[in-house]
Amino acid sequence: MLRIEWNAVRSPLHRRQNTGHEYSSDGIGISHLLGLYNPHVLSRTMLLLHSVCALLLLAPRYSSAEDDPTEPQRNPCANWMGGAPGYPGHNGLPGRDGKEGKDGEKGERGQPGVPGQKGEAGEHGPPGAEGPRGFPGARGEMGESPFLQRSAFSMGLTGRVPTPNVPIRFTKVFYNEQRHYDDSTGKFSCHVKGLYLFTYHLTVYIKDVKVGLYKNSKPIMFTFDQFQSNNVDQASGTILLHLDVGDEVWLQVYGDEFGGIYGDNLNDSSFSGILLYPSQTSN
């Protein structure tokens, strides 16, 4: 009996088995054992132990609480001075970072992805530096010769001009290979469309000179020179004209009192013209 009482005091959660039979009793908590040094508590504790022993003597030796189906099963601390739940503990400090792992093995190369959509064209960048000079290109085909379209003349006088207000007939030929100047009429006729240069150099003798350059019966420019007694004077002029095919150009004395143009073997009066630039198309 004393052994059963000591086990009850030692641990309220233990049960003792004896020859196949189980005796159960509630034990006393440690906090109650610490209070046995108080006289009042000690007397109460002894009274409680005597009550427990009496209950154990009255219980049948061949029966137990688990054999009785009508006896409800009790937990060790059920209805016996259970304490209040404690407060949750504080969170612990974070653990240290682990060591850096080793690099894994290189994976296999994946399949190429689907090409994306074409983006918008970007802005033009700044011009680059000039590149090196290239090699000369192949020689081109021979084009038309500029001599295929030629027109020029240079004519002179052989005597005095007798008649005013008509084209002056220059009959001395310095150059008239294309025969575009007609010495029978004193007129130059355009056969190649383009830009022409006309010049004249006249010797003035006995009378004053006023000469005009005409294009298709319309005066274009005039030259005047006043004769000085006992002297031979000079008059000249130069002009650029654009002519179409069929245009005519000539010189003539302007007025009855201005026919002092003279020419002989020692003193020349000349009239010249030449094609400078032919037009892209010619009739």
Image: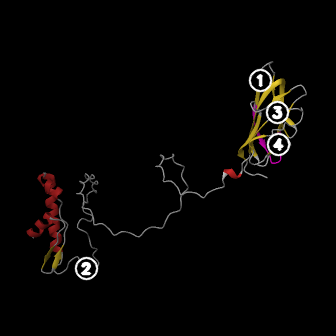
Label 4 – label 2 distance at C-alpha: 166 Å
Q: Amino acid at mark 1?
A: Val
The residue positioned 88% from the left and 32% from the top of the image is 162
Q: Position of residue 107 (x, y in %)?
A: 32, 68
Give the residues in magenta. Answer: 237-249
The residue wearing badge 4 is 183
Q: Count numbered badges in the picture.
A: 4
**Majority secondary structure in the magenta region:** strand
Residue at (50, 53) in percent of width and height = 136
Amino acid carrying label 3: it is Gly
The residues bearing labels 3 and 1 have C-alpha atoms spaced at a distance of: 15 Å
- Secondary structure type for disc 1: loop
Which tag is nearer the camera, tag 4 or tag 2? 4
Residue 15 inside the magenta-drawn segment? no
Q: Mark 4 Cα within 10 Å, few/some/many (few <14, many 20+)?
A: some
Image quarter of residue 224? top right
Residue 51 location, x and y as percent?
Answer: 17, 66
Q: Which residue is mark 3?
A: 159
First in residue order: circle 4 vs circle 1 = 4
SS for callout 2: loop
Q: On the rendered structure, is 18 left or right of 255?
A: left
State which tag comes first along the sequence, 3 or 1.
3
The label on residue 68 is 2
Q: Separation of disc 1 and disc 2 at Cα?
A: 175 Å
Q: Secondary structure at mark 3?
A: loop
User: Dot 3, crowdedness within 10 Å: few (<14), some or many (≥20)?
Assistant: some
Q: Label 4 is placed on what type of residue?
A: Asp
- Classify the position of the N terminus by image quarter: bottom left
Image position of 262 with respect to 85: above or below: above
Marks 3 and 4, how far apart at CA: 14 Å
Q: Is residue 25 left or right of residue 118?
A: left
